[in-house]
Amino acid sequence: MTEPTVWTVNKILQWTQQYFSGKGLENPRLDAEVLLCDVLDCRRIDLFMRLQQELLPEELKKYREFVLRRAAWEPLAYIIGRKTFLQWDFHVTPAVLIPRPETELLVEKLVQYCTGKSLALLEKEAFWRKKAEEARTAAEKARMVSEEKLREETDPEQAAVWQQEVADREAVASQTAERAGLLQEEDREKEPTGHRGPDILDIGTGSGAILLSLLKLLPESRGLAVDISPEALAVAKENAGLLGVSERVWFRQSDFWTGIPQTAQFDIVVSNPPYIPAQVIGTLARDVQKEPRLALDGGADGLDAYRKIAADLPQHVKPDGLAAFEVGIGQGEPVAGLCRAQGFTVTAVVNDYAGIDRMVFAARPDSSKAEWVKKLL
């Protein structure tokens, strides 16, 4: 009688790698590991510590279902239901375009535009703000406990110990807060409205990766997310909750400008619209073709969406505001030209790390931020 196959982590990864290779997938081992990590709820690095671990029947069943879906060229992000963008995991479904690493550059540039700081510096400041808050909480807990102990303590030496613990905790909290720059922030004047950050419009928000990341990195900003797809807006709303920015973002179903109030104006209008020429879509990777065509098809030359957005920029961008776009290969100058035709004559086409034109920024010549755009050149 044949012994049943025992599927260890190592054995099933090897089998899946060969299976995916036979299907023509570009990264068979990586795909196998990502799917197995989701099933086992672990990191990829943890797999190497568990190579001889046997999969449970329910784990094996779920993994087999994932493997079949990937073998049919369903994108990994749709199978596991999420995609990492910057430092956050965004929920994704077949209703939305999967966020790409190159789009992170657009967010980074906009953060620099708003703050003059890099993402690395902002993350460092956020780290120390969190540490300061934790230290303050610890100091407050120590104070409450010590006060209770002091009321009961009859030994003067022990009472001094409790008092010193409170002093030590408060000193740590103060030092950490100073390092975080919180003391300076608390003393800084705020506008009467209490709102000092930019108002941002994201046209074709999809999963919300661009706008919600900006809101997370710019705590005083507000945003409006629009998309023609109600299913996409539902995904973006869920991600807003996951990132904790729901109170500063609004959602509206709209075909470009049609659903946006005529008087609404924004500090930043940003968009990563569909920009693939229609005749090219059939040549894309098979898994990319499974993403929503609505988010890919840019018309005959890939520029249809940019024409529609550029047409109403003068009406909806504040005098000192900025328009920012992600673009496809070779589209930088054409999109910049569309912006210049609408009075946003200060433009910059910015490449990604591969040297491909990937972003366009545009401002009016009399804008206070026009110099920022010029420096990008």
Image (tube, rainbow, N blue to C red):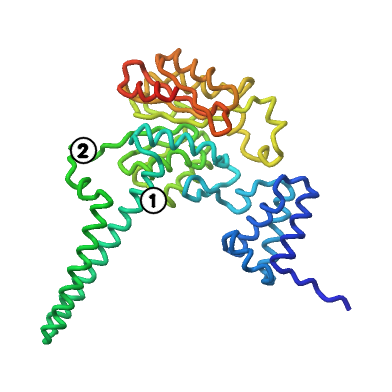
Q: Amino acid at mark 2?
A: Thr
Question: Could you tell whether 351 is left or right of 6 in the image?
Answer: left
Residue underneath mark 1: 244
**Occupied quadrant, residue 159:** bottom left
Q: Residues within 10 Å of mark 1 (few under 14, many from 20)?
A: few
Question: Could you tell whether 276 is left or right of 374 in the image?
Answer: right
Relative vertical location of residue 67 with respect to residue 279 in this rendering, above or below = below
**Mark-to-mark CA distance, 2 and 1:** 22 Å
Residue 249: x and y in percent read 38, 41
Residue plotted at (74% across, 65% down) = 11
Residue 109: x and y in percent read 43, 33
Question: Could you tell whether 85 is left or right of 218 in the image?
Answer: right
* Residue extending farthest right: 1
Taking depth in this image into account, of 81 and 329 the one nearest to the observer is 329
Find residue 193 and name its label. Answer: 2
Question: Could you tell whether 149 is left or right of 306 in the image?
Answer: left
Residue plotted at (51% across, 20% down) = 335
Q: Give the position of the N terminus as an image quadrant.
A: bottom right
Relative vertical location of residue 170 with respect to residue 190 in this rendering, above or below = below
Q: Amino acid at mark 1?
A: Gly
Q: How many marks?
A: 2
Residue 173: x and y in percent read 23, 61
User: Of the residues under marks 2 and 1, which one precedes in the sequence?
Assistant: 2
Find residue 363 and name its label. Answer: none
Residue 230: x and y in percent read 51, 40
Q: Secondary structure at mark 1?
A: loop
Taking depth in this image into account, of 180 and 57 the one nearest to the observer is 180
Residue plotted at (68% across, 42% down) = 287
